[in-house]
Image: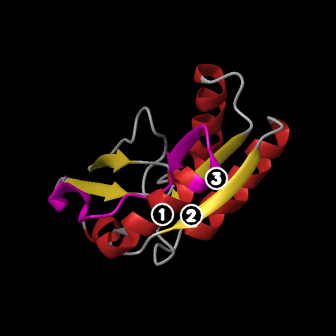
């Protein structure tokens, strides 16, 4: 992305990223990217705490929550760290569940039931989620 940005100031460049594009130097701001570069970001790390705050608002009696991450995603460790910090501030107990393929989901959801978790926050997206067949 940065190489494309450096190569031209006239050809439109559209990006999709899970990192903060301002911090990465891709755009000047989220609200006004400026220049010929624009795109979409999920800001997975930055919004992880907000997801738990929302869960707490929806389920005030929540005590145990779970976070699902894809361990092969490079941002997963940062999302886990931010999530641990957020749940401590909310006085919640966090269980981190990991799935790196569709085959892992059955075990993840069985574990989720065993934990009696009040909610599940999905910390990372998987490209194959849209291809899952629901039984």
Q: Residues within 10 Å of mark 2 (few under 14, many from 20)?
A: many
Q: Would you say the residues marked 2 and 1 are in contact, meaning their CB atoms lie under 8 Å apart?
A: yes
Q: Secondary structure at mark 1?
A: helix
Span highlighted in magenta in the image: 114-134
Whole-Å distance between the Cαs marked 2 and 1?
Answer: 6 Å
Q: Residue furthest bottom?
A: 72
Residue linked to disc 2: 97
Viewer-proximal residue among 46 and 103: 103
Q: Position of residue 35 (x, y in %)?
A: 32, 46
Q: Residues within 10 Å of mark 3 (few under 14, many from 20)?
A: few
Left/right placement of residue 95 relative to residue 102 reads: right
Of labels 1 and 3, earlier in sequence is 1
Left/right placement of residue 7 relative to residue 28 reads: left
Residue found at x 30% / y 70%: 102
Q: Secondary structure at mark 2?
A: strand
Picture disc at residue 115: 3
Residue found at x 61% / y 58%: 79
Residue linked to disc 1: 108
Of labels 2 and 1, earlier in sequence is 2
Whole-Å distance between the Cαs marked 1 and 3?
Answer: 11 Å
Of labels 3 and 2, earlier in sequence is 2
Residue found at x 45% / y 70%: 99
Q: Residue furthest front?
A: 114
Residue found at x 66% / y 28%: 56
Picture disc at residue 71: none
Residue 63 falls inside the magenta stretch: no
Q: Secondary structure at mark 3?
A: helix
Residue 106 position (above or below residue 71): above
Residue 59 position (above or below residue 74): above
């Amino acid at each position: 992305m940065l190489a494309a940005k450096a190569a031209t100031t006239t050809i439109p460049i559209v990006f999709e990223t899970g990192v903060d594009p301002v911090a990465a130097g891709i755009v000047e701001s989220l609200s006004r990217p400026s220049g010929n570069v624009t795109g979409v970001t999920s800001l997975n790390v930055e919004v992880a705490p907000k997801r738990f705050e929302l869960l707490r608002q929806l389920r005030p009696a929540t005590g145990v929550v779970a976070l699902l991450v894809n361990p092969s995603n490079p941002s997963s460790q940062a999302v886990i760290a931010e999530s641990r910090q957020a749940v401590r501030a909310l006085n919640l107990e966090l269980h981190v569940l990991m799935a790196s393929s569709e085959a892992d989901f059955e075990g993840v959801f069985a574990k989720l039931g065993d934990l009696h978790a009040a909610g599940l926050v999905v910390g990372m997206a998987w490209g194959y989620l849209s291809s899952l067949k629901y039984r």
